[in-house]
Image (cartoon, rainbow, N blue to C red):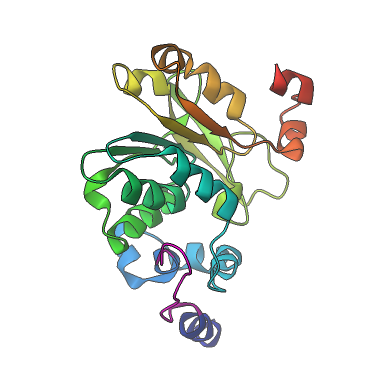
Amino acid sequence: YVKRKEYYTKLYKKDVAFRMEKIRFIEAFISGDLKVHNRKRSDVEADLEAISYYSDGSIPEPGTISIVEALLSEGDCFVDIGANVGLFSVVAGRRVGARGRVIAFEPTPSTAAAFRATMHFNGVSDLVVLHQAADSDREGSALLNIGRTSGHNSLVSLDGATEKVTVDTIKPDDLLAGLKVHVIKIDVEGGELSVLDGLKATVAENPDVRIILEFGPLHLERGSITIAAWMA
Protein backbone atom coordinates (compact mmCIF):
# COMPACT_ATOMS: atom_id res chain seq x y z
CA TYR A 1 0.00 0.00 0.00
CA VAL A 2 2.78 2.45 0.94
CA LYS A 3 4.57 1.91 -2.36
CA ARG A 4 1.36 2.43 -4.32
CA LYS A 5 0.49 5.54 -2.31
CA GLU A 6 3.94 7.01 -2.96
CA TYR A 7 3.47 6.40 -6.69
CA TYR A 8 0.09 8.10 -6.84
CA THR A 9 1.29 10.93 -4.62
CA LYS A 10 4.21 11.58 -6.95
CA LEU A 11 2.03 11.26 -10.04
CA TYR A 12 -0.96 13.31 -8.97
CA LYS A 13 0.44 15.96 -6.63
CA LYS A 14 2.64 17.49 -9.29
CA ASP A 15 1.81 21.05 -10.24
CA VAL A 16 -0.60 20.51 -13.11
CA ALA A 17 -1.19 23.56 -15.29
CA PHE A 18 -4.85 23.27 -16.18
CA ARG A 19 -5.66 25.01 -19.43
CA MET A 20 -8.67 26.88 -18.04
CA GLU A 21 -9.03 27.66 -14.36
CA LYS A 22 -5.87 25.95 -13.06
CA ILE A 23 -8.03 24.34 -10.42
CA ARG A 24 -5.94 22.45 -7.87
CA PHE A 25 -8.63 20.16 -6.55
CA ILE A 26 -6.52 17.00 -7.04
CA GLU A 27 -5.01 17.72 -3.63
CA ALA A 28 -8.49 17.65 -2.13
CA PHE A 29 -8.39 13.87 -2.42
CA ILE A 30 -4.86 13.11 -1.27
CA SER A 31 -3.48 16.01 0.73
CA GLY A 32 -2.59 15.21 4.31
CA ASP A 33 -4.49 18.37 5.27
CA LEU A 34 -7.70 16.43 4.87
CA LYS A 35 -6.89 14.50 8.03
CA VAL A 36 -8.17 17.57 9.83
CA HIS A 37 -11.56 16.82 8.26
CA ASN A 38 -11.44 13.12 9.26
CA ARG A 39 -10.82 11.82 5.75
CA LYS A 40 -9.59 8.29 6.29
CA ARG A 41 -6.79 6.59 4.39
CA SER A 42 -9.30 4.09 3.03
CA ASP A 43 -11.36 6.93 1.54
CA VAL A 44 -8.33 8.23 -0.33
CA GLU A 45 -7.37 4.82 -1.65
CA ALA A 46 -10.94 4.06 -2.71
CA ASP A 47 -11.20 7.26 -4.74
CA LEU A 48 -8.10 6.76 -6.85
CA GLU A 49 -10.47 6.34 -9.79
CA ALA A 50 -11.64 9.91 -9.32
CA ILE A 51 -8.09 11.17 -8.85
CA SER A 52 -6.98 9.57 -12.11
CA TYR A 53 -9.97 11.13 -13.87
CA TYR A 54 -8.75 14.62 -12.93
CA SER A 55 -5.03 14.00 -13.28
CA ASP A 56 -4.22 14.40 -16.97
CA GLY A 57 -4.31 18.19 -16.97
CA SER A 58 -7.70 18.55 -18.66
CA ILE A 59 -10.88 19.95 -17.16
CA PRO A 60 -13.85 17.55 -16.92
CA GLU A 61 -17.19 18.65 -18.34
CA PRO A 62 -15.75 21.61 -20.29
CA GLY A 63 -19.04 22.21 -22.11
CA THR A 64 -21.02 22.55 -18.89
CA ILE A 65 -18.33 24.77 -17.41
CA SER A 66 -18.56 27.05 -20.45
CA ILE A 67 -22.34 27.27 -20.00
CA VAL A 68 -21.99 28.15 -16.31
CA GLU A 69 -19.45 30.84 -17.13
CA ALA A 70 -21.66 32.25 -19.89
CA LEU A 71 -24.76 32.39 -17.69
CA LEU A 72 -23.13 33.98 -14.64
CA SER A 73 -22.06 37.56 -14.15
CA GLU A 74 -20.37 39.41 -11.32
CA GLY A 75 -22.68 39.69 -8.33
CA ASP A 76 -24.91 36.73 -9.29
CA CYS A 77 -26.05 33.84 -7.08
CA PHE A 78 -25.15 30.27 -8.09
CA VAL A 79 -26.59 27.17 -6.41
CA ASP A 80 -24.57 23.96 -6.71
CA ILE A 81 -26.67 20.91 -5.79
CA GLY A 82 -24.58 17.76 -5.74
CA ALA A 83 -21.39 19.77 -5.48
CA ASN A 84 -19.00 16.81 -5.15
CA VAL A 85 -15.44 18.14 -4.65
CA GLY A 86 -16.30 21.61 -5.91
CA LEU A 87 -15.36 22.02 -9.57
CA PHE A 88 -18.41 24.11 -10.46
CA SER A 89 -18.39 26.03 -7.19
CA VAL A 90 -14.83 27.17 -7.86
CA VAL A 91 -15.67 28.26 -11.40
CA ALA A 92 -18.81 30.04 -10.22
CA GLY A 93 -17.07 31.69 -7.28
CA ARG A 94 -14.45 33.20 -9.52
CA ARG A 95 -17.14 34.34 -11.92
CA VAL A 96 -19.53 36.01 -9.45
CA GLY A 97 -16.78 37.53 -7.32
CA ALA A 98 -17.02 39.11 -3.89
CA ARG A 99 -20.39 40.75 -4.63
CA GLY A 100 -21.97 37.42 -5.56
CA ARG A 101 -22.63 34.21 -3.68
CA VAL A 102 -22.29 30.47 -4.19
CA ILE A 103 -24.48 28.12 -2.18
CA ALA A 104 -23.43 24.47 -2.37
CA PHE A 105 -24.92 21.20 -1.15
CA GLU A 106 -22.94 17.97 -0.67
CA PRO A 107 -24.13 15.25 1.73
CA THR A 108 -21.20 12.82 1.80
CA PRO A 109 -19.00 13.61 4.84
CA SER A 110 -15.65 12.77 3.24
CA THR A 111 -16.56 14.49 -0.03
CA ALA A 112 -17.74 17.57 1.83
CA ALA A 113 -14.33 17.67 3.51
CA ALA A 114 -12.68 17.48 0.10
CA PHE A 115 -14.98 20.27 -1.11
CA ARG A 116 -13.86 22.56 1.71
CA ALA A 117 -10.23 21.82 0.90
CA THR A 118 -10.84 22.55 -2.77
CA MET A 119 -12.33 25.94 -1.92
CA HIS A 120 -9.34 26.71 0.30
CA PHE A 121 -6.76 25.65 -2.29
CA ASN A 122 -8.43 27.84 -4.89
CA GLY A 123 -8.90 30.91 -2.70
CA VAL A 124 -12.70 31.06 -2.84
CA SER A 125 -13.64 29.85 0.66
CA ASP A 126 -15.03 33.26 1.59
CA LEU A 127 -17.36 33.25 -1.42
CA VAL A 128 -18.91 29.80 -0.93
CA VAL A 129 -21.33 28.45 1.68
CA LEU A 130 -21.53 24.66 1.93
CA HIS A 131 -24.52 22.82 3.40
CA GLN A 132 -23.63 19.23 4.23
CA ALA A 133 -26.99 17.73 3.33
CA ALA A 134 -28.80 16.05 0.46
CA ASP A 135 -31.44 18.09 -1.34
CA SER A 136 -34.89 16.58 -1.61
CA ASP A 137 -38.57 17.50 -1.49
CA ARG A 138 -38.66 17.23 2.29
CA GLU A 139 -36.52 17.79 5.38
CA GLY A 140 -35.41 14.74 7.34
CA SER A 141 -32.85 12.00 6.80
CA ALA A 142 -32.15 9.27 4.25
CA LEU A 143 -29.70 6.51 3.40
CA LEU A 144 -27.00 7.59 0.96
CA ASN A 145 -25.50 4.84 -1.19
CA ILE A 146 -21.73 5.28 -1.42
CA GLY A 147 -20.29 4.38 -4.81
CA ARG A 148 -16.80 3.42 -5.93
CA THR A 149 -16.06 7.07 -6.58
CA SER A 150 -17.57 10.13 -4.93
CA GLY A 151 -19.37 11.24 -8.07
CA HIS A 152 -21.57 8.14 -7.97
CA ASN A 153 -23.01 8.56 -4.45
CA SER A 154 -26.79 8.57 -4.60
CA LEU A 155 -30.00 8.42 -2.60
CA VAL A 156 -31.27 6.11 -5.36
CA SER A 157 -30.43 2.39 -5.07
CA LEU A 158 -26.94 1.74 -6.41
CA ASP A 159 -25.52 -1.58 -7.58
CA GLY A 160 -22.08 -2.14 -6.14
CA ALA A 161 -22.47 0.41 -3.35
CA THR A 162 -19.58 0.05 -0.91
CA GLU A 163 -21.63 1.20 2.09
CA LYS A 164 -24.66 3.19 3.13
CA VAL A 165 -24.60 6.19 5.44
CA THR A 166 -27.42 8.19 6.97
CA VAL A 167 -27.40 11.83 5.88
CA ASP A 168 -29.59 14.84 6.51
CA THR A 169 -32.02 15.82 3.76
CA ILE A 170 -33.10 19.38 3.22
CA LYS A 171 -35.69 21.15 1.10
CA PRO A 172 -33.69 23.77 -0.84
CA ASP A 173 -36.65 26.17 -0.88
CA ASP A 174 -36.24 26.55 2.89
CA LEU A 175 -32.69 27.90 2.52
CA LEU A 176 -33.15 29.89 -0.67
CA ALA A 177 -36.33 31.76 0.31
CA GLY A 178 -36.09 35.45 -0.51
CA LEU A 179 -32.86 35.15 -2.49
CA LYS A 180 -32.38 36.27 -6.07
CA VAL A 181 -31.05 33.09 -7.68
CA HIS A 182 -29.58 33.21 -11.17
CA VAL A 183 -28.26 29.71 -11.95
CA ILE A 184 -28.86 26.30 -10.34
CA LYS A 185 -26.83 23.21 -11.22
CA ILE A 186 -28.33 19.85 -10.18
CA ASP A 187 -26.31 16.62 -10.42
CA VAL A 188 -27.56 14.09 -7.86
CA GLU A 189 -27.31 10.75 -9.65
CA GLY A 190 -30.98 10.04 -10.24
CA GLY A 191 -32.66 12.17 -7.59
CA GLU A 192 -33.14 15.24 -9.75
CA LEU A 193 -36.95 15.18 -9.79
CA SER A 194 -37.15 15.17 -5.99
CA VAL A 195 -34.78 18.13 -5.92
CA LEU A 196 -36.92 19.99 -8.44
CA ASP A 197 -39.97 19.37 -6.26
CA GLY A 198 -38.04 20.96 -3.41
CA LEU A 199 -37.28 24.01 -5.56
CA LYS A 200 -40.81 24.92 -6.66
CA ALA A 201 -41.00 28.07 -4.55
CA THR A 202 -37.50 29.19 -5.57
CA VAL A 203 -38.34 28.79 -9.26
CA ALA A 204 -41.63 30.66 -8.77
CA GLU A 205 -39.78 33.52 -7.04
CA ASN A 206 -37.10 33.56 -9.73
CA PRO A 207 -38.86 33.07 -13.09
CA ASP A 208 -35.67 33.89 -15.01
CA VAL A 209 -33.51 31.34 -13.17
CA ARG A 210 -31.47 29.03 -15.39
CA ILE A 211 -31.34 25.37 -14.32
CA ILE A 212 -28.64 22.96 -15.49
CA LEU A 213 -29.92 19.45 -14.84
CA GLU A 214 -28.17 16.12 -15.32
CA PHE A 215 -30.01 13.66 -17.55
CA GLY A 216 -28.85 10.08 -17.02
CA PRO A 217 -31.08 7.28 -18.37
CA LEU A 218 -29.28 4.67 -16.27
CA HIS A 219 -29.86 6.73 -13.13
CA LEU A 220 -33.53 7.05 -14.00
CA GLU A 221 -33.78 3.31 -14.53
CA ARG A 222 -32.34 2.66 -11.07
CA GLY A 223 -34.99 4.92 -9.60
CA SER A 224 -37.81 3.42 -11.70
CA ILE A 225 -38.38 6.80 -13.37
CA THR A 226 -39.36 6.88 -17.03
CA ILE A 227 -37.82 9.32 -19.47
CA ALA A 228 -41.32 10.65 -20.17
CA ALA A 229 -41.83 11.41 -16.47
CA TRP A 230 -38.45 13.13 -16.32
CA MET A 231 -39.29 15.29 -19.34
CA ALA A 232 -42.77 16.22 -18.11
Q: Is residue 161 left or right of residue 24?
A: right
Tell me if I can see residue 85 in this picture: no
Q: Is residue 154 left or right of residue 175?
A: right
Residue 99 percent across, percent down from the top left? 21, 39
Residue 177 position by quadrant = top left
Q: Is residue 203 left or right of residue 54?
A: left
Tell me which residue sits at (40%, 63%) in the image: 28
- Per the rendered image, the range of residues in magenta is 12-25
- In this view, 222 is above or below 23: above
Nearest the eye: 159 or 11: 11
Residue 141 percent across, percent down from the top left? 46, 27
- In this view, 27 is above or below 105: below
Tell me if I can see residue 120 in this picture: yes
Tell me which residue sits at (45%, 15%) in the image: 207
Residue 214 percent across, percent down from the top left? 62, 37
| Image quarter hosting the N terminus | bottom right
Nearest the eye: 7 or 42: 7
Q: Is residue 24 magenta?
A: yes
| Image quarter hosting the C terminus | top right
Residue 110 percent across, percent down from the top left? 43, 53
Q: Is residue 109 magenta?
A: no
Tell me which residue sits at (35%, 18%) in the image: 174
Total labels: the figure holds 0
Residue 22 position by quadrant = bottom left
Tell me which residue sits at (45%, 38%) in the image: 71
What's the magenta bit mostly, secondary-structure-wise? loop
- In this view, 187 is above or below 41: above
